[in-house]
Image (spheres, rainbow, N blue to C red):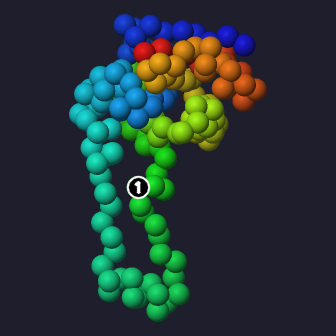
């Protein structure tokens, strides 16, 4: 069980298909990544979906169809294709959690759902490699994971 530590100076170099990052406010490195992504992360945090017009809501109610909840609270991650800017395929932003272990568990869940591509995790400012190893626990092997400490 060994993690590969990446320095902030070389964190944007090739080596992983999927980069998982915290929210923009949690890491200076994410702000730098966001700049290269044309501020897609910042724009996504400010986006508010439009509500349905009353006529559509009436039709849904009359036809006994479910109404989808597109509120921002339902979104816990954002996947951005990034191969045109970075030497990877995707950047996945996972919303911060009150509990560190919950955030790390979200990483494991999303990574597994994506069929475990090679992974680079950008830790929030103030978190270290040992914090990540403890929270990761027995989720899976750490061999194909590199970690960037801000």
Using a 10 Å C-alpha cutoff, classify the residue at mark 1 as few (fewer than 14 neighbours), some (14 to 19) or many (20 or more): few
- Under tag 1, what secondary structure? helix
Residue denoted by label 1: 72
Which residue does the image show at 36% across and 20% down from the upper left?
A: 29
- Judge whether residue 122 can be spotted in this image: no
Rendered location of residue 79, percent (x, y): 43, 40
Residue 144 in the figure: left or right of residue 78: right
Which residue does the image show at 31% across and 57% down from the upper left?
A: 48
- Judge whether residue 137 can be spotted in this image: yes
Residue 121 in the figure: left or right of residue 134: left
Which of the 4 image quadrants contains residue 132?
top right
Q: Examine the rendered structure and indicate whether residue 118 appears above or below residue 39.
A: above
Residue 35 in the figure: left or right of residue 88: left
Which residue does the image show at 47% across and 19% down from the upper left?
A: 126
Which sits in the foreground, 90 or 74? 74
Q: Number of numbered discs present?
A: 1
Q: Quadrant of the N terminus?
A: top right
Which sits in the foreground, 128 or 5? 128
Q: Examine the rendered structure and indicate whether residue 15 appears above or below residue 88.
A: above
Q: Quadrant of the C terminus?
A: top left
Q: Residue furthest bottom?
A: 62
Rendered location of residue 114, percent (x, y): 58, 38
């Amino acid at each position: 069980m060994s993690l590969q530590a990446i320095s902030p100076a070389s964190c944007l170099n090739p080596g992983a298909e999927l980069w998982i990052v915290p929210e923009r406010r949690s890491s200076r490195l994410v702000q730098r990544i966001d700049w290269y992504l044309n501020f897609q992360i910042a724009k996504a945090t400010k986006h508010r979906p439009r509500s349905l017009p009353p006529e559509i809501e009436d039709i849904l109610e009359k036809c006994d169809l479910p109404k989808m909840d597109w509120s921002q609270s339902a979104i816990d991650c954002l996947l951005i294709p990034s191969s045109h800017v970075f030497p990877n395929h995707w950047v996945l932003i996972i919303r911060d959690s009150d509990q560190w272990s919950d955030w790390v568990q979200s990483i494991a869940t999303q990574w597994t759902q994506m069929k475990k591509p090679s992974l680079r995790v950008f830790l929030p400012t103030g978190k270290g490699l040992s914090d990540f190893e403890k929270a990761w626990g027995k989720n899976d092997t750490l061999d194909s994971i590199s970690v960037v400490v801000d």
